[in-house]
Amino acid sequence: MNPKKLSRRSFLQAAGALGMGAGLARAVPAFGSPFLQNTTLRWWWWADEPGFSAWIDDVAARFAAQHSGTSVETLQMDVSAVITQFTTAAAAGEPPDVQFLWNGLYHMENVWLGYLDPLNDYLPADVLRDSNATAMSIYEGKQYRVGWYPVPLLFEYNKDVWDQAGLDADNPPATWDAWMGACEALKTAGFVPFGGGASDGYWGEWYLTLMLTQALNNGGEGIDLFIGERDFREPRYWEFWAKLEEMVKAGYLNNDILSVDLFSAVNKVLTGELATTLNVGAVLPAHIAQIGDRVGMMIAPVYSDGAMGGKPISDTQGFGIPSGSRNKELAAELLALTQSPESLDAMWSLTRYFPANKTWDPSPIDDPTLRQLYDGWVGAETTLWLSVLMPTMFWTDAMFVAAQEILAGRMTAEQAGEQHASIVQQWRMLNDDLIPNYQVFAASIAAESL
Amino acid sequence: MVRTRPLTPYLFIAPLVGLLVFIFGYPLARVFDFSTRRIRGFDGPSVGFANFEALFADPVFWLAVRHNLQLLLAIIPLLLLSLLLAIALYERLGGWRIFRTIVFLPYILAIPIVAVVLRNMFQLNGPINTVLRSVGLEGLALDWLGDADIALWTVMAMIIWRESAFGVVLFLSRLLSLNEELAESAQLDGANWWQRTLYIVIPQLRGVIEFYLVLSLITLLAAVFSYVYIVPGRGGPGNATMILELYIYNWAFDKRLPGMGAAVSVVLFLVTIVFMVLMFRLRRQAAAEEVG
């Protein structure tokens, strides 16, 4: 057809034909579905370490190979959208079939909205238990996640730098006073003793988790504090900010902490620009690959007398099944596959990191530093990651602001306590419908004595 | 002459009007509806004006308003810079083709890309301060993003740098369509370059300048989210770069209270409308005075 001579009639005929074609294309699968049985399982995920995509791809490929006519479509989410993207999709009735979920309130609020199904109906009790999703995935006796990999939270330091400052790098300080002494020695030797990047807020969250935890006896007390059943104006609950203030005043932190983001700064510990920083276990294999056994790890130095103090902190990332999934049985089979011995071994062989599952045999860990991480923060008795029990409003309005203002020297710890109490009251006023759920959750966490 | 029924034209445009009402009107109505509810998911009970009461009682809201108003100060430099660059390019000064590309480039790049690059450049120990220190200007090597007293001004400078590119495009396209005879005859009458620019060229740009002013106003009130979210990071340090858009985002997504987010959106929408009505009224008044 000569395009120059395209008449209106021809154009309308062509458009009509295209429209019919499109309509038929949609209609055909509906007629053909009993024969084709094509199902696409949608799996949305995120990980602290992007390299974990190798494991996701491997599991997805093995699942598709085991289920003919089924394909797995994976989507790697951005850290800032992990919660919001899922909640929005769930509210719109278009969630994925398997969803990555952070622990605690980050998925529990979706449970209360009816966006997640309990897994007890789909998976055997021992699979759920062994996956090590922790008690923060359980509400009223129902479990909503299976575990994927553990997330230890710790102080990471450069042993070479500590050696040069005359410190015993194999015996890091356990108490606050000893820690401050180490910082002074590092500073005297010309190093930046401690720090990171706080511009995006996560450093503040990690600091709060490592330090406020020590003022508490269990996670239930943490929830009580965040929802106003306890008072942030009590000195024991803002003392952790006073410790940060103390370090700022002593000049122990890097001067650019407010202008760099978390993960840019974390790597400064490798070059010795920072002697010590805060880090999560999933990032450590990459650091160990670069400086080997010069990677030092320590539990946060103890300053308070809460029962949770002095213990290693570790959480678990995990997956759940959205209530709006149209393929729940298949999704459950995929979750079961993530917990199979092959998948647990594949996690180690593909990522050089370990799965959370309690049944996994850690003997393949051939690196002593990684083994130290596993034994100290995964195999040992650990305590919970407090900030996953923090309502997001506390994150944005209280923690984020206070951490940065204290680092800038514009707010005192006591003022931070006042500010937190005020934000908590605002949260209560706007979320009074959720308070009973939080109270039930707090009671069950407290009962676990975490 | 063919006579048409009075309703006929309206029938022709009805489908498009319907589509526009659906695309813009429905979401707007939902936002107004959400603002009076405590939304959980997609629905929730009515709470009357409680969201607005909580909003007006929140000091962070007023801080965000103040920051947005502060950002409006950028309109003047935006306009002047755009005009200056457009006229310079119009005059075809040496190397103008290269300069044109350089000026347009930031506008072609997506804001998040520009923001990430600028964030790295403006870090305390980033390239800009490194250069300043290396040329002995240590005193000017400020903590551009980490100092709460400076961060919003840094963001404003970035906005001016990028958004002025659009003004240049706009003004240059109008300049290229001007009737050059006027300027030539003024030149013959002895008018120098400044006189021609001030009294011949710029008055002819009046319409497009007004359009750009309205657009800049809307941009600075409601389209700078990416800058403050990425460059200093989440409106920090503290709340030093908190603006209304980010404040809305925090309520709607991070804090999971879309009703509160909708209440702020309603306020922002109404304020923007008031600004625009005022501007159009001033314009009409000025036009009437000219005719008079």
Image (spheres, grey):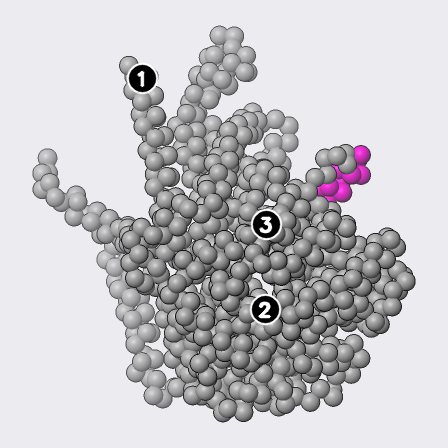
Disc 2: host chain: A
- Which segment is the magenta one? B126-136
Describe the element under mark 2 as helix, strand or loop: helix
Q: Is residue B223 left or right of residue A172?
A: left
Q: Nearer the viewer, residue B266 or A20?
A: B266
Q: Nearer the viewer, residue A82 or A195?
A: A195
Is B131 colored magenta in this rendering? Answer: yes
Q: Residue at (57%, 85%) from the top-left corner?
A: A131
Q: Nearer the viewer, residue A402 or A215?
A: A215
Q: From where the camera sits, is residue B167 visible?
A: no
Q: Where in the figure is residue B157, as x and y percent of width and height?
A: 59, 37
- Mark 2 and mark 1 in contact? Answer it, CB < 8 Å: no
Reading the image, the residue beneath label 1 is B289
Describe the element under mark 3 as helix, strand or loop: helix
Q: Main secondary structure of the magenta part?
A: helix
Reading the image, the residue beneath label 3 is A415
Against A224, is B267 above or below?
above
Residue type beneath disc 2:
Leu
Q: Where in the figure is residue A232, as x and y percent of width and height?
A: 55, 59
Q: CA distance from mark 3 to mark 2?
A: 22 Å
Residue type beneath disc 3:
Gln
Against B99, is B206 above or below?
above
Which corner quadrant holds the N terminus of chain A?
bottom left
- Mark 3 and mark 2 in contact? Answer it, CB < 8 Å: no
Q: Residue at (37%, 39%) from the top-left corner?
A: B271
Q: Nearer the viewer, residue B212 or A320?
A: A320
Which corner quadrant holds the C terminus of chain A?
bottom right
